Amino acid sequence: MTVVSRPALAVAALTLVLAVAACGGGTAADGEATPVATTTVDLPTSYRFAPVAIAVPAGATVTWTNHDNFTHNVALDGAQPLTMAPGESATHTFSTPGLYPYVCSLHPKDMKGSVLVTEP
C-alpha cells in the first residue's frame, strides 16, 4: 500500500484545480461548477456570481464586487452576510481548508457560489 503525505495530496489537488481552471473552468458534466483559481468574484448584472466556484489557498482573501444595479450580499454559513450596494466590494479571508458554499440571501434562488479552500 502506498501512503501519500497530506502536503503532497494538497499539492496534487491544487494542481488539478489549476489545470482545470487553465482549460477555462465552466460547468462539469454533473452540473456542478468547476472551481476557478482566483480571489475575485464579480456580481455582474443578471443576478449571478462570476465565476460561480473558485479555489484559493488557505489564508487568501476573496473580494466580491457588485457591478449590478441592485444590492446583493454574500452569506457564508453561520456568518453575518457581507452586504454590497451597487459599486461596492466586500472581502473575507479564508483560513481553514474546506468547501464554503454561499448565497446572496436577498436572492438565494438565483445567486449561489462556493469557495474551495486548499492547503497553502
Image (spheres, helix red, strand yellow):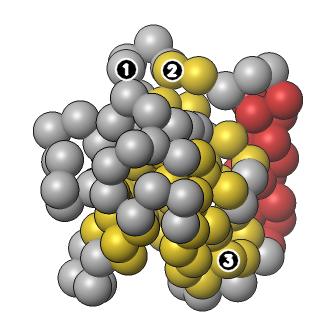
Is residue 31 rendered to the left or right of residue 26? left
Give 16 or 76, whichever is nearer the viewer: 76
Judged from the image, the secondary structure of the residue bearing numbered disc 3 is: strand
Residue 26 point in image, percent of width and height:
59, 22
Residue neighbourhood size for the residue with mark 2, other residues' Cα within 10 Å, grouped as few (<14), some (14–19), many (≥20): few
Q: Which amino acid is tagged 2?
A: Thr
Judged from the image, the secondary structure of the residue bearing numbered disc 1 is: loop
Residue 117 point in image, percent of width and height:
59, 66
Location of the C terminus by quadrant is bottom right
**Quarter-wise, where is residue 6 in the image?**
bottom right
Residue under pointer 1:
31
- For the question of whether residue 16 can be seen, the reply is no
In the displayed structure, would residue 92 be above or below residue 53? below
Location of the N terminus by quadrant is bottom right
Residue at the (33%, 64%) spot, across then down: 73
Question: Is disc 2 in contact with disc 3, using a CB cutoff of under 8 Å?
Answer: no
Residue under pointer 3:
61
Judged from the image, the secondary structure of the residue bearing numbered disc 2 is: strand
Name which of mark 3 and mark 1 comes first in the sequence: 1
In the displayed structure, would residue 103 be above or below residue 78? above
Question: Is disc 1 in contact with disc 2, using a CB cutoff of under 8 Å?
Answer: yes
Q: CA distance from mark 3 to mark 1?
A: 27 Å
Q: Which amino acid is tagged 3?
A: Thr
Give 98 or 35, whichever is nearer the viewer: 35
Q: CA distance from mark 2 to mark 3?
A: 24 Å
In the displayed structure, would residue 68 be above or below residue 82? above
Mark identifier at residue 27: 2
